[in-house]
Image (tube, coloured by chain):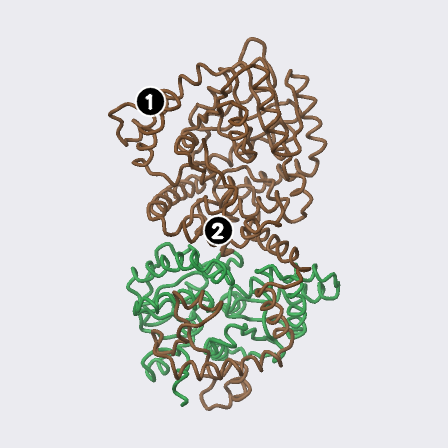
Chain colours: A green, B brown
Amino acid sequence: MRVALQVTCVNDAMFPDTGKAVVRLLRRLGVEVDFPRAQTCCAQPMVNTGYLDEAVPVVRNFVDAFAGYDAIVTPSGSCAGSVRHQHALVAERSGDPALADAVARTAPRTYEFTELIVDVLGVTDVGAYFPHRVTYHPTCHSLRMLGVGDRPRRLLEEVRGIQLVDLPQAEECCGFGGTFALKNADTSIAMGADKARHVRDTGAEVLVAGDNSCLMHIGGVLSRQRAGVRVMHLAEILASTDETEGESDGPVVGERAGDIS
Amino acid sequence: MSGTFVGMPAFPSAAREALGDTQLRRNLAHATRTIRDKRAQVVGEVEEWEELRLAGAGVKEAALRDLATHLETLEESLTRAGATVHWARDAEEACAIVARVAKSHDVDEVVKVKSMATLEIGLNDHLEREGIAAWETDLAELIVQLGDDLPSHILVPAIHRNRAEIREIFRRRMAAVGRPAPDDLSDDPAALAGAAREHMREKFLRAKVAVSGANFAVADTGTLVVVESEGNGRMCLTLPDVLVSVVGIEKVVATWSELDPLLRLLPRSSTGERMNPYTSTWSGVTPGDGPQEVHVVLLDNGRTRALADEVGRQALRCIRCSACLNVCPVYERVGGHAYGSVYPGPIGAILNPLLRGVEDEQTASLPYASSLCGACFEVCPVRIDIPSVLVEQRAAVVDSHRSDRVPKAEAVAMRAAAWTFSDSRRLRLAERASGLAGRVLGRFSRTTLPGGRAAAGRLPGPAAGWTGARDLPAPPEESFREWWDRTDGGRADGEEGRS
C-alpha cells in the first residue's frame, strides 16, 4: 500500500513536530509514508471564506500532488473533511470534468490519521507511553464532519501512564473556525475563553486534540492566561515512548526559535 | 411600539457590543442550555429519529419541488372552503392587505397569534402607522412588545430577559395599554403568567379581528395549522369574527399525511416536548363556529429568490423550531439582536441573505457569523445542511465583490495565499521567509508558551485580531518539508524520525 502524508500547510509551516510525530508513529506501526513534495494546502481557507475561484488551482495542485497513492493520511480532521466534502464543490465550480474525476479519486482515499490507524491498520495500542494528566477536545470537523467518533479516545486509552480526564462540554466548538477567529475575533475569544475554563476545570496538564489550528487558538488563550496547561497534537502523544519521555522535560513541543542564536 | 432592526451594524460590531452585556450573557447561557438539554433528552427517546428527520426533509423537499402546483391547489381548496386568498409579492403588499381587511371592519386594534411571517414583514409598525394597534398575545412576544424591544429568538423571543426584568416591564408598561399589572406583582413565573393572562383576556374578549401566521398549510383540504404551547393562539383563532393569516409560500404541504413527520419532529426539536400542547387547524369558514370571515395572505417576500438557489433552497424546509439557535455557540454568546433580523442564529445567517440578497453590508456579514462547527446541522429536524449553505452564501458575498474596482484587503490576501498554495516552490520560499521571521520574533520574544516554545509577541495589522487576546507561537526555523529534505524523512538524522 502506497501511503502519502498530507502534512497540511499549518503543520508544515507552524507545527512541523506534528508531521514528524506522524512519520515516526506510522513507521513504528510498519507503514512508511511518502511526502509528496508538490503538496501545499487543501484549499479550506479559501473555500470557507467564500473564495471558490481561488480554491480551484489549490485543489488542482492537491490532486496532482497526491495522484496514484492508495491512501492519503493527514493529522487534521478539518483538512481531511475539506478534502472529502469540499473538493467536489470546488471541482464543480471549476467546470472542469477532469478535475472532478481526479477529486473523485483522491477524496475517498483521504484519511484522518486515527481513521487510518484504527480502521485500516486495525490497531488501538500503538505502544505509546505518556505519564501525564491529559484531557481530550474532539474538534468539530473530526467529530461532526468526518465522524471519527471514539477512535482518538480508544487510542488514548491504550497509552501507558496516561491519566485521561473528561473535558466538560467537550463537544462544543472552541471558537477557532478559520478566518472566523479574525473576522469575528470577539466572539471567537468569548468561545475560546469558555473552552479554556473547561480545560482548566479538569486539572489537566495537557490538552490534546487532532487539529493544530484549534489547538493554536485554545493554546493561545491558555498561554495568555498563564494557565499552566500546554496543548499537544494527538499524534505527538501517540508517538511518545519511554525513550522520548526520558530524554526531555516534556514531549516534543517544537524547537525554541531562540535556541539557534 | 416596537424597536427596529433597520440600520443595525454588521454582525462583528453588533456582536462585540452584545458580548459586553453581562445580563444577556447570563440569561442566554442559562436558557439555551436548559432547552438544549431538554431537546436532547426527548430526541434521545425516539429510536427512529434519523428516519424521522429524513422523512421530514423529504416531505418539505417534495413540497418545494412542486411548489407552484401545491399553491394553486391550496388557493382552490381555501376558496372552496369560504376563505379569501390574497397573494403578496413583498412585505409592503402583505401589510397593505392586512390593513385593508382590518379597516373594512372599522377596528382600531387586532389581536395577534405569534407569527414569524408578520414579524418579518414588520406588520405591527405598518398597522400602527395606519392607526391600528396590534396586540401580541404570545407571552414572550408580549414581553418584547411591552418592553419596546426586539425579538431575539424564534421560539422564545424574550429569551434575553430574565424574570426580574419581565416583572419590571409588566409593572411599568402594562397600564399604558390595558389592564395594569397588580401592585404586588412578584417575579414568580406563575404570578407573571397570571398578570399576562389578566392583561390579555380583555383583549381576547374585545377584539373583532385576529391576525395569525401558520406553521403549515395543507393544499388538498385548504387547512392551516398553528402549533403553540399557551392556548393564547387558539383564543385568537376562535373568538374574533375575522381572521387574517399571513403564510409564507414555503409552508405548503400536499396532504394531511405529510403533517405526520413534521408534527412529530417539531415539538421535540423546539420546546423539548413529546407532543405539542395546542395544535389548531382550520379550513376556511365553518358556519356558526369561529371566525366567519377568513383571509389568507400567501407571502413571497424573497422566497422564490431563495428557491432559485440550488444549494440554499433547502433553507425553505425550515419549520422554525429554533433547535439550531439553542445549540449554536455563537448565538449562545451574542444573542439574537446581533443578527439584525427576526430570524437570528444559524438559520437566520442563511435565510436572511437568501431572502434579501447580500448587497447590504449587514446581511453580507451574516454568513460569516459562524465557526462552521456543524452543531446546527446535527440537530436540524429537516436536515438543512446549514454549514454548507453558509459556505455557499459566503461565496455569494465574495462573488458580489468580484468586479469591485478596489478589492478588499481580504480578497488580496486570499489571492496571494492561493497563488502561494498553487505551487509548492512558492510555499517553500514563503516558509523560508516565515522561518527567518520566526528566528527574529523568537529572539525578541519575551513570552514563552507553556511547554517552552517562543511566542511571536503582539503583532500589528489584521494579525492583531489574533494576538490581542491569544498568544501565537513564533514560526519554527525549519518547516516540515525542509526537515524532510534534510533528514530524508527522518531516516538520515540519526534520530529515526524523531526531532
Left or right for A173, reference A107: left
Q: Which residue is mark 2?
A: B375
Across and down, in percent, residue B490 comes to: 50, 85
Amino acid type of the residue tagged 2 in the rendering: Ala
Nearer the observer: mark 1 or 2; the answer is: 1
State the mark number for residue B180.
1
Residue B354, above or below A174:
above
Q: Amino acid at mark 1?
A: Pro
Evaluate if marks 1 and 2 touch, with contact meaning CB atoms under 8 Å apart.
no
Q: Name the residue nearer the viewer: A176 or B49.
A: A176
User: Is residue B426 shown above or below B242?
Assistant: below
Q: Position of residue B486 (x, y in %)?
A: 53, 89
Query: x, y percentage for residue B37?
Result: 39, 43
Q: Give the farthest residue toward the left.
A: B184
- Chain of the residue displaying label 2: B
Tell me the quarter of the picture where residue B424 sits: bottom right
Question: Quadrant location of the C terminus of chain A?
Answer: bottom left
* Front residue (pair A34, A260): A260
